[in-house]
Amino acid sequence: MAATHADDGSDPIRAARSALRVERRRVVDEREALSAFRSRVSSIPDENAAETGGGGFEGTAGVGGAVGGAVRDAVGNAPRPGSRLVAVREAYRDTVMSVPHYAEEYDDTYERSVSEEFGPEMAYALTRTQSFRAEYKRSLLGAVETAVQEREAFLDALESEIESVERAGSRLDPIRSEIEAIADELGGDEADAADAGFGALDACRTRTVALREDCDRIAARRQRVLADHERRLALGDDLDLPEYCYQRLDVSYPALAAVGTVGDRLEALRSRIERAMACGD
């Protein structure tokens, strides 16, 4: 997918809001799909060792022929249609692999998907063995529960991020308005600004300093929220929540980018005021 411009027309926070809405919808869809898969698996009977003669995870390595080939029984026949492992596979495809964003976001095979979601050992048990053993079912239900809980934790972090981005945006809006008001007072160029008089210019400069302090406070609060995300979530060794959520944007930290842009405007305005003050001396 092509990158979304960070300012989304005028403001990186607008792009962040859009990206967060998409991510929240996707995580909710995945949580609901996993919950539905858990219900389907719960209703599928397992097969005990007496029925199948199979072993647990430790005994799966030699079952079903060469790794990478189709699962076969002792005489080379493929699993019969309607078997319990097939039922698990169909349940997974009907739920987890059927979320609207699956092809765009993952586009994995069944085996690859269950390996990524539940681990390679669980994937082997579900795709390279002949029966849905009781221990497989218990392990699978536990893994699904963990996956659901992970989505719940991620949703909590997303809600915190959404709130933080909204707060940053609402606090930046009046600063932008104040910048425009000061610029209007100064007129079109340094000569116009100098006509305002030293006292008025000094008051404008004091306002820009106060506004810059407001920006610094907004940035500091954002940094605290980002640090909290890092403590709560582990998305990968080199990836944090904003980088994950905003990976299709031009910037990884759009709220901080917005603060930086406003700060740059304030610095430019302050410099302009000081040049006008120098002209009036």
Image (spheres, rainbow, N blue to C red):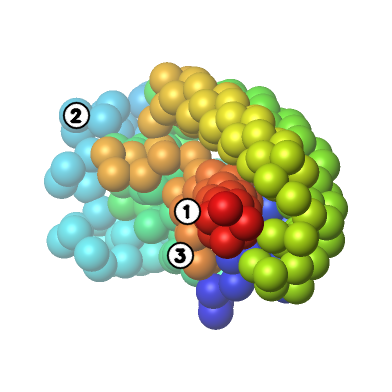
The spot of residue 194 in percent (x, y) is: 69, 60
Contact? badges 1 and 3 (CB < 8 Å): no
Q: Residue at x 44, y 65 (%)?
A: 109
Marks 1/3: CA–CA distance: 26 Å
Circle count: 3
Give the mark nearest the N terminus, 2 or 3.
Answer: 2
Q: Residue at x 83, y 56 (%)?
A: 185
Closer to us: 276 or 65 = 276
Say the numbered circle drawn on residue 58: 2
- Mark 2, residues whose alpha carbon is within 10 Å: few (<14), some, or many (≥20)? few
The spot of residue 204 in percent (x, y) is: 72, 43
Circle 2 SS class: helix
Marks 2/3: CA–CA distance: 26 Å
Closer to us: 3 or 44 = 3
| Left-right relation of 190 to 241 | right
Q: Residue at x 65, y 67 (%)?
A: 190
Q: Amino acid at mark 1?
A: Ser
The spot of residue 89 in percent (x, y) is: 54, 53
Closer to us: 118 or 125 = 118
Question: Residue 265 falls in which quadrant of the image?
Answer: bottom right
Q: Nearer the viewer, mark 1 or mark 3?
A: 1
Q: Amino acid at mark 3?
A: Asp
Check disc 1 and report the residue beneath it: 252
User: In which quadrant of the rendered image does the N terminus lie?
Assistant: bottom right
Circle 3 SS class: loop
Check disc 3 and report the residue beneath it: 108
In this rendering, the answer to whether 47 lies above or below 96 is above
- Asked whether residue 26 is in view, the answer is no
Closer to us: 83 or 255 = 255
